[in-house]
C-alpha cells in the first residue's frame, strides 16, 4: 500500500516538516556527490551497532560515539529509500506539527528517531551493518497521527496483481495495517544473522511506540475540533 495524500486539513504552515524534508534531500544529494566515498560516509556517520557497543564498553562516551544516533536519521541508502520516507513524512507530518506546535514537533521527531535507533540497536547490538534513514523518526510521527487523527482518510494506492486500486482508508486502518506488517516482519527477522542487511524493522516498531509514549508529553492541553 502506498499513501498518496490525506484529507486532513491543517491550519498552520508546517515549517519544521518542510525543513526536515529539505535537510534529508540535501544530505542525500551530498552523499551521492561523494562518488566512491559514498559507502565510507555511511559507515562513518551511520549508526553501526557493533561500533557503538565497543565504544560504550571502553567508556568512549564523546561526541563521535553518539553523533551517529542523530546523523543517521538524516541519511539514506538510495533514491527509493529517500522518496518513500519523504512521502510518508510529507503526508502525515504536517498535521502532527499543526497539532502539537513547531518546536515541540522538532523535539518529538528527534526523540522518536533516537527511540527507533535504540530499539534496533538493542535487538542486535553486535551488527556491523550501518543503520541509516529517517523511517524510525517518521514511524514516531505515524504513532502520533493514528492517535490524534484516527478517522482521517488516507488515499491509498493498492496494487492487486496486475491491477491498481485507489482506496480511501481511515488512518487507523492504514496505519494499523502498516504497524502489523512491521511487527510481522520484525518477528520473522529475529535470529537472522547479524551481517544480513535490509530494513530495520525494529527501528520502525520502536519509533512508532516511542511516538505513542511521547504524545502524552507533547500534545497540547487543549480541546480541538476534528474535521475530516
Image (spheres, rainbow, N blue to C red):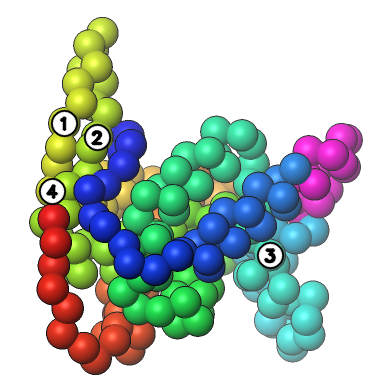
Q: In 3D space, how far apart are the residues under numbered discs 2 and 4 (Cα atoms)?
A: 10 Å
Residue at the (39%, 68%) spot, across then down: 12
Q: Mark 4 points at which residue?
A: 170
Q: Check contact, mark 4 vs mark 3: CB within 8 A.
A: no
* Mark 1 burial class by Cα count in 10 Å: few <14, some 14-19, many 20+: some
The disc placed on residue 156 is 2
Q: In which quarter of the image is residue 4?
A: top left
Residue 5 position by quadrant: top left
Give the labeled residue for mark 3: 71
What's the distance in space between the residues labelled 4 and 3, CA to CA? 33 Å
The answer to whether residue 117 of the structure is visible from this angle is: no
Q: What element carries label 1?
A: strand
> In the image, residue 85 lies at what x, y percent?
48, 46
Q: Where is residue 46 in the image (x, y as percent from the top left)?
A: 69, 58
The secondary element bearing badge 4 is classed as strand
Does residue 227 appear left or right of residue 98 in this picture? left
Location of mark 1 (residue): 167
Which mark is nearer the camera, 1 or 3? Answer: 1
Q: Quick one: label 1 or label 3, which is nearer the N terminus? A: 3
Q: Main secondary structure of the magenta part?
A: helix
Query: Mark 4 or mark 2, which is nearer the start of the sequence?
Result: 2
Q: Give the range drawn in magenta.
A: 30-43
Cα separation, mark 2 vs mark 3, equals 31 Å
Amino acid at each position: 500500500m502506498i499513501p498518496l495524500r490525506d484529507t486532513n486539513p491543517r491550519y498552520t504552515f508546517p515549517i519544521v516538516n518542510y525543513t526536515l524534508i529539505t535537510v534529508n534531500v540535501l544530505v542525500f544529494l551530498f552523499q551521492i556527490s561523494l562518488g566512491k566515498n559514498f559507502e565510507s560516509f555511511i559507515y562513518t556517520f551511520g549508526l553501526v551497532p557493533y561500533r557503538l557497543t565497543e565504544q560504550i564498553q571502553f567508556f568512549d562516551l564523546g561526541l563521535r560515539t553518539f553523533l551517529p544516533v542523530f546523523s543517521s536519521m538524516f541519511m539514506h541508502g538510495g533514491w527509493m529509500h529517500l522518496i518513500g520516507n519523504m512521502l510518508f513524512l510529507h503526508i502525515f507530518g504536517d498535521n502532527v506539527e499543526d497539532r502539537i506546535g513547531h518546536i515541540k514537533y522538532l523535539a518529538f521527531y528527534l526523540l522518536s528517531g533516537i527511540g527507533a535507533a535504540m530499539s534496533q540497536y538493542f535487538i542486535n547490538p553486535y551488527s556491523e551493518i550501518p543503520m541509516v534513514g529517517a523511517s524510525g523518526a517518521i514511524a514516531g510521527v505515524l504513532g502520533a497521527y493514528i492517535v490524534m487523527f484516527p478517522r482521517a482518510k488516507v488515499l491509498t494506492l493498492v496494487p492487486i496483481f496486475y491491477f491498481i486500486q485507489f482506496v480511501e482508508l481511515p488512518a487507523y486502518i492504514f496505519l494499523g495495517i502498516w504497524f502489523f506488517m512491521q511487527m510481522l516482519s520484525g518477528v520473522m527477522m529475529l535470529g537472522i544473522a547479524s551481517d544480513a542487511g535490509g530494513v530495520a524493522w525494529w527501528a520502525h516498531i520502536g519509533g512508532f511506540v516511542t511516538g505513542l509514549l511521547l504524545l502524552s508529553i507533547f500534545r497540547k492541553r487543549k480541546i480541538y475540533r476534528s474535521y475530516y
